[in-house]
Image (spheres, coloured by chain):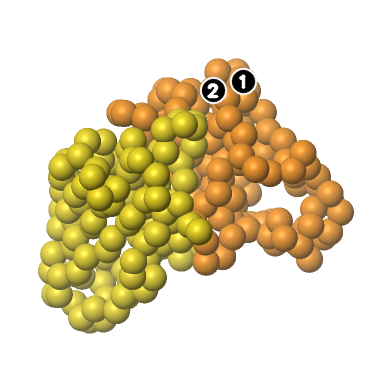
Amino acid sequence: SQELEQSPQSLIVQEGKNLTINCTSSKTLYGLYWYKQKYGEGLIFLMMLQKGGEEKSHEKITAKLDEKKQQSSLHITASQPSHAGIYLCGINSGGSNYKLTFGKGTLLTVNP
Amino acid sequence: DAGVTQSPTHLIKTRGQQVTLRCSPISGHKSVSWYQQVLGQGPQFIFQYYEKEERGRGNFPDRFSARQFPNYSSELNVNALLLGDSALYLCASSLRMGTGTYNEQFFGPGTRLTVL
C-alpha cells in the first residue's frame, strides 16, 4: 500500500468554487510539503507544514496539518483557471530525513 | 535570483546508451537531490548530495550514479538505459542536508528523458 494517499485523484470544478485536497500518511509525520506541478514541468513549492495544528496560507491557498490523524488538507478558495495543475504532497518520514516521499498527486481542472 | 536550472530540457536515447543530466542549484544552496517521476506517479527519490558527498540513496540500481562539484552543481548519470528509465528527472536544491525544518526543497523544471 502507498505510504501517502492523496484524494481525490482528480477534481473538476467551476471557476469561483472552493475545493479541498487531502493527503494521508500511513507513518508518523515529521513535516509535510505541498507542491504544484504543471503537466510535464517542475514542482512549484507552495508551503511546508511542520507542527500539528499548523496552518499556512499563500494567496487563496490554505493548508493545515493534523498530526494526530497523520493528514493534511489543502483548501483553495474561489478557484481560478490559474490554479489548475497537479497538487503533490510530500513527507519527510523521519527515519530518512534526506528524502521526500510523494503521493501520486491530485489533478485539478478549473473550468472557466 | 535564478531558480534551480537543469539541462538539457529534453533528451532522446536508445536502449543501452548512457546519459548525463545536469543541475545547478539556487545560489547559496549546498544540497542537491535527484528524483525520477514516471508519468502518473509522484517523484521517486534517487540521491541526495551535500558538500560533494552522497548523503542518501533511494532504491535504484547501480546503473544510476551522481556526483556534486565544488560549485555545488550536480550530474546524474544513467548507464545501460532501459525503456523503463523514460521519465522526468527532477533536481531539487536546499540550503542544507536533509528535508527538515526551514530547509525547503526547491525543484527545477526537469529533464524529460525518452528511451527508445
Q: Amino acid at mark 2?
A: Tyr
Label 1 SS = strand
Name the residue nearer the viewer: A98 or A112. Answer: A98
Q: What residue is rendered at 28% in x and 41% in y? A: A48
Mark 1 closeness class: few <14, some 14–19, many ≥20 residues within 10 Å: few
Query: Does residue A2 appear left or right of residue B1 in this picture?
Result: right
Q: What residue is rendered at 33% in x and 70% in y? A: A8
Query: Does residue B14 appear left or right of residue B37 in this picture?
Result: right
Q: Are marks 1 and 2 on the same chain?
A: yes
Q: What shade does chain A have?
A: yellow
Q: What residue is rendered at 68% in x and 33% in y? A: B66
Q: Is residue A18 above or below residue B8?
A: below
In the picture, which quadrant includes the C terminus of chain B?
A: bottom right
Q: Amino acid at mark 1?
A: Glu
Label 2 SS = strand
Query: Does residue B114 appear left or right of residue B111 in this picture?
Result: right
The residue that label 2 is drawn on is B50
- Residue B53's tag is 1
Name the residue nearer the viewer: A108 or A29. Answer: A29
